[in-house]
Amino acid sequence: MISATLIVLTLGAAIAAFSISASLQLILMDSVPAWLGVFDFPAILLMLLPLLLACKGMRQSCTRPCTENRRLLGALVASVVLMGALNFYIFLVLTAAQPHGDWDAWAIWNLHARFIFRGGGDWHAYLTPALNWSHPDYPLMLPAAVARGWQILKGETTLVPILVAATFTALPILLVSFALRALRSKLSALLGAAVLLGTPLFAGVGSTQYADIPISYFYLASLVLLALRETSPNRGAALFASFTMAGCAAWTKNEGILFLLVAAASHLAVTARHKGLKPCLKDSFVVLAAAAPFIAMLVMFRQMTPGNDIMTSVSGSSLSERVLDIDRYGEIIITAVIKLVTFNNGLAIAAGAVLLLLGTNNIRKNPAIQTCLIIVGAMCLGFFAIFLITPHDLTWHLATALDRLMIQVWPSVIFAGLLSYDITTKAAAGQILPDGEHPSAPDRDGNMPSLP
Amino acid sequence: MKDKATFITLAVLLIVCVSFANIAQDIFRNGRTDDLMTRLKQINRPHSYDLIFRDLRPLLPERGMLGFFHDAPPAGVSTRVAETAPYYQAQYAVCPLVLCYSTNHSQVLALYRDFQPGMELGTVTNTHTPVTATLGGAMLLRKERKK
C-alpha cells in the first residue's frame, strides 16, 4: 500500500509541477510553455525528488494482524465500489449540465486560464482593479494547469478543466484509503473511502471545477506525508515533501497560505514539545526550505495583482467594529453548528460518534497524529477569523463559502480522525485468515503493537 | 471482545447506510431536470455567450478595455445573480479584452437579449452608435464624434 500511496502522491505532485513550471514562466518570462518549459526540470525536482526519497525504504507500518472480519470487509469493499460508481455518475451528470464549471469556475479559474492562454505575453491583462470581482489576486495553480493543457492540445477545450477536476476529485479518495491501509487497517481504509464517497457534495463540488477540491488534496497529501514520515528512513525528505504539498495548497487558493502557516507552526510546536528545541530548529530549516519557493512565487505574484478584498479591509475602525460585534460571533457559531449537524445528513456527526465510542485512542502516543489534529482544528479557527473580519455581508458569505470550506478540510478530518483510532474487528472463531496474515502477539501488558 | 466486534460492525454498517442515503438523495435531486437544469440554463450559460460573441470577435480589438452594458434580466429572474451574470459571462467570452461595466468608453459592448432591427436601445445610444449586431443580441457601439 506504500507504493499505491506513492503513486497517488506522485500523480498529484506531477500535476502541481506541471502548473508551477507554467506559473514561473508566466511570472518571470511573460509566456506560457507548451510541451517543454525552461522551469519544468526545477519544478519536477522540487516536487518529485523529496517524495521519492521519502518513500524509498519506507515500510508499511500496518504490521497489525489482519484478524478482521472478512465478511464485513467483503461487504464494505462491495459498498465502496458501488458508491464510487454512483459518485462517478453524479460527477458526469453535473459536468454534462455545466461543462465550463459552475459560476466561480468560469468567473474566476477558467477565466484566468483563458487570459493566460489567449493573452500570451499580455496574459496579465486581468490583473486589474476593473476585474476585482474575479479575484485577480488568486494564485495560479489551477489556471496555469488548465492553460498549459490547452497549449499542449493547441486549442481551448472544456475537456482539460474537466479532466483536472476529475483527477483532483479522485485523488483524495484514493489517498485517504491507501494511506490509512498503510498506516492502520483495511477496515480503517475502507471506512475512510466509504465516508468520503458517502459525501456526494465532494463529487458535486469537484464537478464545479472550483479550486476547493484540489486544495483539499494538497492539505491531505501534506498531512499524509507528515504521518508517513514516522515510517520513513529519510525523515527530512518526508518533511520537505509534506511542506512542498502545503506550499502547493498556498499556490492554489488563499486559504492555502493559512494552511501553510498553521501546518508549520503546529508541526514545530509539537516537535519542540516532544523532542526538544534542537530537532525543532532542524525541522524549521527543512520547513523553510520547502516553503521558500512558494513564498517567493506568492510575493512576486502579489507585486503584480490588486489587493485581496478581505485583506485590504483589515485596517481602520470598520475592522475593530466587526471584531467587537458580538452578534457576528453568534451568527458564525450558530451557522457553523447547524452546517456541521446537517452536513451530509448527519454523516459527519455519525462518523465522529462512532470514532469516539470505538477503538484505542492513539492521540497521546503519537506526535504526528497530534500535529494533524491541531492543523485541522487551527484551520477551522482560521476560517472563523476570516468570517469575523470579512467586509462582505456575513450571512451571504457564510451561505456561499462555509460548505466549500468544510469540504476543503473534510478529507483531512477523515484521515486524521481514522488515524487516531485503531479500528479492527476480530474474525469469527475458526474463520480462515487471508494468506500471509497472522495474528500478532500482544505485549506483556496485553496491548497491541503501537502504530505511528 | 465479541460484543465490541458486533458493535463495530453495526457502527460501520450505519455509516455505510447513511452514505448510501446521501448519494441516493443527491442523485434524486440532480435527476429532477425541472429544477437544476432549468436554473443552470437560465443563468449559467457561458457556452451560449461564446456563440453570441463569436461573430462579433473579428470587429473587436485584440487587446484593451471596452465598456459594457445590457438590458434588464428576463422576467421572473430578477435576482442579483441574474443581473450580473450577463456581464461576467460576456467577460468570459471576450477575454483577453477587459470589459468595464460602464458606458464611459469609446467602444461599448452591449447585449440585448430580445434585439430586433429598429428597436429602441435606450439612453446609451444618445452618445454611441451601433456598429453591428449579431443574432444573439450582442452588439458593438462606438461613441459618436461631435461634428
Image: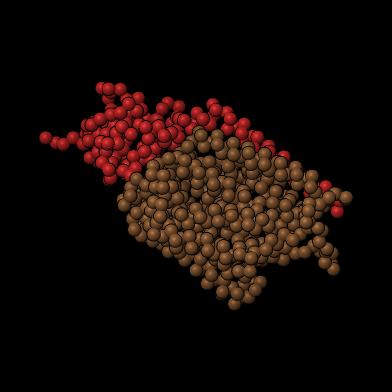
- The residue sitting at 61% across, 45% down in the picture is A339
Of the 4 image quadrants, the one containing the N terminus of chain A is bottom right
- The residue sitting at 69% across, 51% down in the picture is A189
User: Which colour denotes chain A?
Assistant: brown
Q: Nearer the viewer, residue B25 or A58?
A: A58
Q: Residue furthest bottom?
A: A278
Q: Identify the chain drawn in red.
A: B
Q: Nearer the viewer, residue A114 or A309?
A: A114
In the image, A426: left or right of B140? right
Q: Residue furthest left?
A: B147
The answer to whether residue A344 is visible is no
Vertical arrangement, residue A161 with respect to residue B113, above or below: below
Measured from the top left, where is residue A229 in percent x and y? 63, 65
Q: Residue furthest front?
A: A435
Of the 4 image quadrants, the one containing the C terminus of chain A is bottom right
- The residue sitting at 25% across, 36% down in the picture is B59
In the image, B75: left or right of A408? left
